[in-house]
Image (cartoon, rainbow, N blue to C red):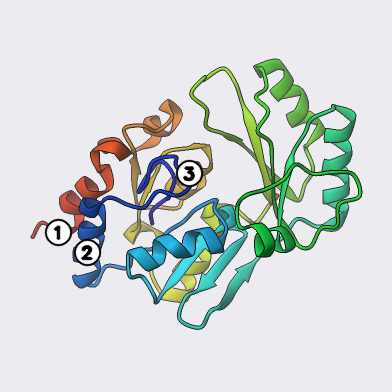
Amino acid sequence: MLDVDGTIIPYQYTALPSQEIADAIHLARNKGVTVCLVTGRSYPSTKRILEYLNITKGYVVVDGGALVYNLEKKRPLYERYIEEKDLEKIISVFDKENVPFYVKDKFTIANRGDQFKLYSVGQKLDQVSMIFTDELFSLDKTHKLLKRLSFPNITVLRTKHKDPNKYAFNITHLQATKLHGIEVLCKELGIKRSEIIGVGDGYNDFPLLMASGLKVAMGNAIEDLKEIADFVAPSVTDNGVATVIEKYLLKD
């Protein structure tokens, strides 16, 4: 189970995996290994990467776990969107705190991919999978917002930033994390979580690693993720995922 940004590609929206990583994934799949991307990206922006890797069958977990998509049948296997009543509460909190934010919903994705506009009052929304901020908050402001966003049916995750003392947020349905997406796949594929290798780099990859039997953090990962990892791979710019595949999947 591979995260995308910061794991198989650098943090560049139009980037594709290096040839070394693409070759390693190809070799693993030829050995019968199921390779699944698990990402906060939407399906449309992930599709280009899947096509580049020639992954046309199986499943992909997108929108941070809000959607598990069947690639062969071209339809959702699992969907969890923020409930309308919770959406109203979240918008109200950010409005009162004067926090600008983005909303990822089906309408926006269909028309703009992952190139989102800031939310504006009265904006029409359709099945919101994620709310996120670009604004960076101090620790005190973060704690204040977390308290105000303590609703029972949502998950609030911090997002990675080069300044470890600054934070932004991703908000999804409570059952829309990477862990939930992987649990759906385990049931569908008839596998155990102990059989999974999970690789990631950011805060939203804690659920991914916690759902995996072997936890791998990238060399460029946040320090907190490295602390729970069984193995720290080289960084994304050093093709760390290729190292993971060779170390754990290709050696006889």
- Earlier along the polypeptide chain: callout 3 or callout 2? 2
Image position, residue 83 (x, y; %): 80, 57
The dot on residue 250 is: 1
Which amino acid is tagged 1? Leu
Mark-to-mark CA distance, 1 and 2: 7 Å
The answer, for residue 80, to whether it is visible in the render is no
Q: Quarter-wise, where is residue 25 in the image?
A: bottom left
Secondary-structure class at tag 1: helix
- Earlier along the polypeptide chain: callout 1 or callout 2? 2
Image position, residue 19 (x, y; %): 23, 54
Q: Are marks 3 and 2 in contact (CB under 8 Å)?
A: no
Q: Quarter-wise, where is residue 134 in the image?
A: top right
240 vs 95, left or right, is left
144 vs 8, left or right, is right
According to the picture, the residue beneath numbered tag 2 turns out to be 28
Q: What residue is shown at x 39% (from left), y 68% (from top)? A: 51
Q: Are marks 1 and 2 in contact (CB under 8 Å)?
A: yes
Which amino acid is tagged 2? Ala
Image position, residue 23 (x, y; %): 20, 59
Q: What residue is shown at x 50% (from left), y 53% (from top)? A: 39
Mark-to-mark CA distance, 3 and 2: 22 Å
The answer, for residue 242, to whether it is visible in the render is yes
- Label total for image: 3
Quarter of the image with the C terminus in it: bottom left
Q: Are marks 3 and 1 in contact (CB under 8 Å)?
A: no
According to the picture, the residue beneath numbered tag 3 turns out to be 205
Q: Extreme left residue here?
A: 252
Q: Nearer the viewer, residue 83 or 99?
A: 99
Q: Work out whether 175 lies above or below 167.
A: below
The dot on residue 174 is: none
